[in-house]
Image (cartoon, rainbow, N blue to C red):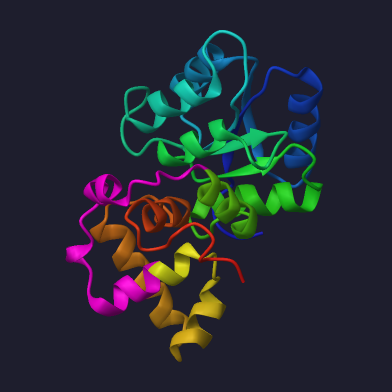
């Protein structure tokens, strides 16, 4: 186990889901600092505990997880930096999940995730290192991304990127890992990590999940083009 212990809030209206996830994470040394049954409770828990990460169900009574995610990531709940948010869902192709990704969520997990994947996902999201389930996330983006690329291109100005960075962003959009990027561009993984970090910094993105969304919304990748 490396790095600081992640501090996590679990927000889900099903008590069994909250309890199960809490037991799994706690058994691996991850600190579950609060649980919440709806969006309002999630906001209160984030204000009170200042977690590193929130596991957020989107479909909850009252204030739903999507709006709670927007409020948390806008910086209106706690001062910057806000916690990262991973969306919990029963369906991999869920319009609400895509909306959450565009709002800044770092990725999503299906509720039938294995204990090992849950723990790994929390640790990776805490570090901001990886896009979760890239193949599924890519399908999700392809299904719900705006088809009007002329309008979508206004969302981000890719002119701040070098030609190589644009190529790397396009490849990230297809779900390639750093190792696969290194192989494609004949670069070291360290150099790839540097390129990805510069892309995120220049486009003011939190992580690779947002980079995938931007690659599609700017028309750099078109739906269906990323399939391998």
- Picture coordinates of residue 202 (x, y %)? 24, 60
Residue 26, above or below 3? above
Residue at position x 38%, y 58% from top? Answer: 215
In the visual, does 120 lie left or right of 131?
right
Expressed as whole percent of the image width and height from the top left, the position of residue 194 reads: 36, 74
Residue 146 is covered by the magenta coloring: yes
Q: Residue furthest bottom?
A: 186
Q: Nearer the viewer, residue 98 or 42?
A: 98
| Quadrant hosting residue 42 | top right
Left or right relative to 159: residue 98:
right
Residue shown at 33% from the left, 30% from the top: 74
Whether residue 18 is in magenta: the answer is no
Q: Main secondary structure of the magenta part?
A: helix
- Please count the marks in the image: 0
Q: Is residue 99 something one can see in this rendering?
A: yes
The span shown in magenta is 144-169
Q: Foreground residue, 228 or 17?
A: 228
Does residue 97 lie above or below 119 as drawn? above
What residue lies at 59% left-to-right and 47% top-to-bottom?
A: 5
Q: Is residue 201 above or below residue 85?
A: below
Q: Image quadrant for the N terminus? A: bottom right
């Amino acid at each position: 186990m490396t790095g600081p212990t992640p501090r996590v809030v679990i927000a889900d209206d099903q008590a069994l889901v909250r309890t199960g996830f809490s037991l799994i994470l706690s058994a691996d040394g991850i600190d579950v600092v609060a649980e919440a049954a709806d969006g309002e409770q999630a906001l209160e828990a984030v204000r009170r505990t200042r977690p590193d990460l929130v596991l957020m169900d989107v479909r909850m009574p009252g204030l739903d997880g999507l709006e709670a995610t927007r409020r948390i990531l806008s910086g209106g709940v706690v001062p910057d930096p806000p916690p990262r948010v991973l969306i919990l869902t029963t369906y991999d192709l869920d319009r609400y999940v895509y909306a959450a990704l565009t709002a800044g969520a770092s990725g999503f997990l299906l509720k039938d995730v294995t204990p090992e994947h849950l723990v790994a996902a929390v640790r990776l999201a805490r570090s901001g290192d990886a896009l979760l389930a890239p193949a599924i996330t890519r399908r999700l983006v392809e299904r719900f991304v705006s088809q009007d690329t002329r309008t979508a291109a206004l969302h981000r100005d890719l002119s701040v990127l070098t030609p190589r960075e644009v190529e790397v962003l396009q490849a990230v959009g297809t779900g390639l890992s750093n190792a696969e990027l290194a192989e494609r561009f004949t670069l070291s993984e360290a150099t790839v990590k540097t390129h990805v970090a510069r892309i995120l910094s220049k486009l003011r993105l939190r992580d690779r999940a947002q980079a995938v969304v931007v690659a599609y919304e700017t028309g750099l990748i078109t739906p269906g083009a990323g399939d391998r």
